[in-house]
Every structure is written in C-alpha cells, then in structure tokens.
Amino acid sequence: MAQDREQRKEYLQKKKEVSQLRAHLTSINIEKEKLYQQLRSGAEQIRSIMGNINQLTQERDQLTTQVKSLKEEREKLNEAVKEKSHDKQDVLDKKKDLLEETGRKENPGRLKAEIARLEMKIQTEVMPFEKEQQLTKHIKELKITLKKIEQRGEAWKEVQSASADFSDARKKANDIHQQIQIIAQRSQEKHEQINKFYDQIKQLRQQEKPAKQKYVELKSQLDEGKKKFDEVVARVNEMAKLFHEDDEKSFKAKAREKSVEVQEKLKSGKKLRMEDILAFQASKE
C-alpha cells in the first residue's frame, strides 16, 4: 500500500510537471516565433535594399560606359584641336610672309587698273623699243605683285577657315568635356547612394545579431524541452495504464466479496438493496 501511495504521488507530480512543461514550451515557442517574424522582416528589408543597389549599380555602370565612350571621343577631338592649331599657325605664317612681300597697303584693284592702262599704252602709243621693254617688264612685275596679293587673299580665307575649324573642334572638345563632368557627377552620386544602402544593410545585420543568437538559444531550449516533455508524458502514460489496471482489479475483488454477501442474504431471506443487486451483477460479468 505504501508503494502504491508513493507511485500515485509520483503520478500526480508527473502530471503537474507535464502541465508546467507544456506552459513553458508554449511560452518559448511564442517568443521564438516573435523573433522569427522580426528576423524575417529584417531579411525582407535587406532584400528590398539589395534590389535598390542592383538597380543603382546597373544605372551607374551605364553612366560609366558613357563616360568612357565620351573620353575616347574627347581624346580624338583634342588631337583634332592640336592638328587644327598647327594648320592655323601654318596659314598665319604663310599670310605673314605674303604681307611682308607685298606690303599691307597694296590695292589689287589699283594694280589691275595700272596693268590695264600700261598694256593699253603699249598697244596704242608709238614709243621707242627700249621704252616698250621697260613698260613690259614693269607690267610683269605688277602682275607678280598682283598674284601675291591675290594669294594673300586666299591665305586670308584659309586663315578664316582654319580658325573656324580650330574653334569648332575646340568647342566640340569643350562640350564633350562638360558632358563628361555632368555624367561623371551623376555616376558618383549613384555610387554614393549605393554605399549608403550598403551601410544600411550593415547596420541591419548588426542589429539582428542579438535576435539571431537569441533565436538559436530558444530553438535549442525548445528542442531540449520537447525531449524532456516527451519523457515525462511517456512516464505519465505508463503510470496511468498501471493505475487503471490496479483500479480494475480492485473493483472486481470487491465485487466478488459483495457477491458473497448477496448470496448469504439470499440464503437467509434478507431483503436486497439496489447496490447489492448491482454488485451481484458485476461479479457475474
């Protein structure tokens, strides 16, 4: 009997322990799920930020490609500027030489008129042969001077054309340079935005470290608690089965005793109560 009482006492304690363990596991699981949702929310934020980073990286790389292409074009234009500068200087030198040879005040119209007058004079006037030769020689000299003056005019046109080409090439190079500066600035802004997003990710991951550690701890506690819970439940079930059998044996023994009493009452003619009848029926079963 003492052993039976000890077993029943243990049984009740184990049942109480099962209840306590269940409540404890429920509490741990609730806290673990809260942490899981927190970590999941952080992971979604990181995925969203990474999406922004990927988009910005693609845009930055496109801008970088544009800058590279424009730099190559600018380099070609700079070479053209150098070439045009040399051409312009050559034409200026040519013009300077012609000015020195012809003089700055020579008028091509006056020279043409003088040449025409002298040629007419030779044709219409009677003059000594020597005089005619002198005029012919002078006409040749005037024609040479006129040709140089006309060349000077062509040189001036070349100077204007070379200057225009030089200015155009330099303007294009400067325009390209301005485009490079603008696009490079936009690329740098994209790069800085990317770095800020990476800083945000770094901060989020730093913030989630304690939550991750706590989640792992709670999961470990939950696993250990479940193992303990299963052990206690198994013991409770085992003892419950044992006590059920003992209760059934005790009931049958009492029913047999009661059946004997009922039979004695029947023999002596005593009146049977309802509990006597039930006990007698139980003993038959």
Image (cartoon, rainbow, N blue to C red):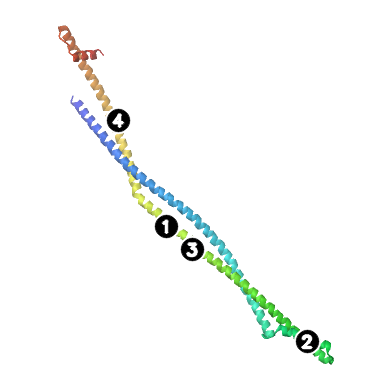
Q: Position of residue 194 (x, y in %)?
A: 45, 57
Residue 196, numbered label: 1
Work out whether mark 4 precedes mark 3 in sequence or the reverse, and give the earlier one: 3
Instruction: Report the Cα–Cα distance between label 4 and label 2.
Output: 140 Å
- Image quarter (top left, top right, bottom left or bottom right) of the C terminus: top left
Q: Name the kind of residue labelled 3 in the image.
A: Gln
Assign a secondary structure to mark 2: helix
Which corner quadrant holds the N terminus?
A: top left
Question: Whole-Å distance between the Cαs marked 3 and 1?
Answer: 17 Å
Looking at the image, is mark 4 or mark 3 nearer the viewer? Answer: 3
Marks 3 and 2, the one that precedes in the sequence? 2
- The residue sitting at 37% across, 47% down in the picture is 39
Q: Is residue 173 left or right of residue 196?
A: right
Could you tell which of marks 4 and 1 lies nearer the N-terminus?
1
Residue 34 in picture, x, y percent from top left: 34, 44
Q: Report the amino acid beneath label 1.
A: Lys
Q: Quick one: SS at disc 4?
A: helix
Please report contact status of discs 4 and 2: CB closer than 8 Å, yes or no: no
Q: Of the residues tagged 2 and 1, which is closer to the observer?
A: 2
